[in-house]
Amino acid sequence: MMNETQTRLILSTAPNLTEARRIAAALVERQLAACVNLIPGLESHYRWQGKVETAEEILLLIKTTEAQEKTLLTALSELHPYEVPEGLVLPIAGGLASYLEWVAANSKGDS
């Protein structure tokens, strides 16, 4: 049975739906993530190279396991068009056992 503390939610953003879909498909195809949800319509405000910027982005909610976390972040960095992509890891405190088990079963890396 999957322990909740082994499940991870990784947040990232992409510049457009095409890039978000490409990244999501690669992570799921490589079995680094069980699921990636894409949420369009995000407006980001941030400082980049000394200037305040605003951009429309797509939010990626990436479900994976602690065991795949580092490999997934490396892949995300390689796949991403941004010079400094977002990759925030949130541990999961709980959830439906069947869903957490599904995440674990589908985040085993390239087998």
Image: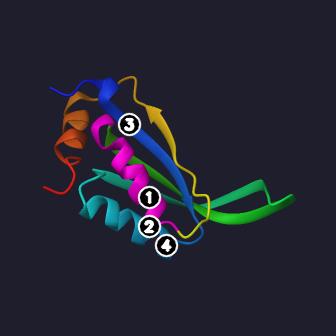
Tell me the amino acid under the disc marked 4. Glu
Residue wearing tag 3? 8
Residue wearing tag 4? 19
Distance from Cα at disc 3 to Cα at disc 1: 15 Å
Residue wearing tag 1? 76
Q: Is residue 75 left or right of residue 19?
A: left
The residue under the point 36% across, 42% down is 69
Between disc 3 and disc 1, the foreground one is 1
Distance from Cα at disc 3 to Cα at disc 2: 19 Å
Give the numbered dot on residue 79: 2
Q: Is residue 33 left or right of residue 1?
A: right
Tell me the amino acid under the disc marked 3. Arg
Q: Is residue 95 left or right of residue 19?
A: left
Q: Nearer the viewer, residue 55 or 26?
A: 26
Please tell me whether residue 106 belongs to the stretch shown in magenta: no
Crowding at dot 3, Cα within 10 Å, few <14 / some 14-19 / many 20+, comes out as many
Tell me the amino acid under the disc marked 1. Leu
Distance from Cα at disc 1 to Cα at disc 2: 5 Å
For the residue labelled by badge 1, is the local secondary structure a helix, a strand or a loop? helix
Crowding at dot 2, Cα within 10 Å, few <14 / some 14-19 / many 20+, comes out as some
Q: Main secondary structure of the magenta part?
A: helix
For the residue labelled by badge 4, is the local secondary structure a helix, a strand or a loop? helix
Rendered location of residue 25, percent (x, y): 33, 67
Q: Which residues are magenta?
A: 66-80
> Which mark is first along the chain, 4 or 3?
3
For the residues bearing labels 1 and 2, Cβ distance under 8 angstroms = yes
For the residue labelled by badge 2, is the local secondary structure a helix, a strand or a loop? helix
Rendered location of residue 106, percent (x, y): 20, 48
- The quarter holding residue 3 reads top left
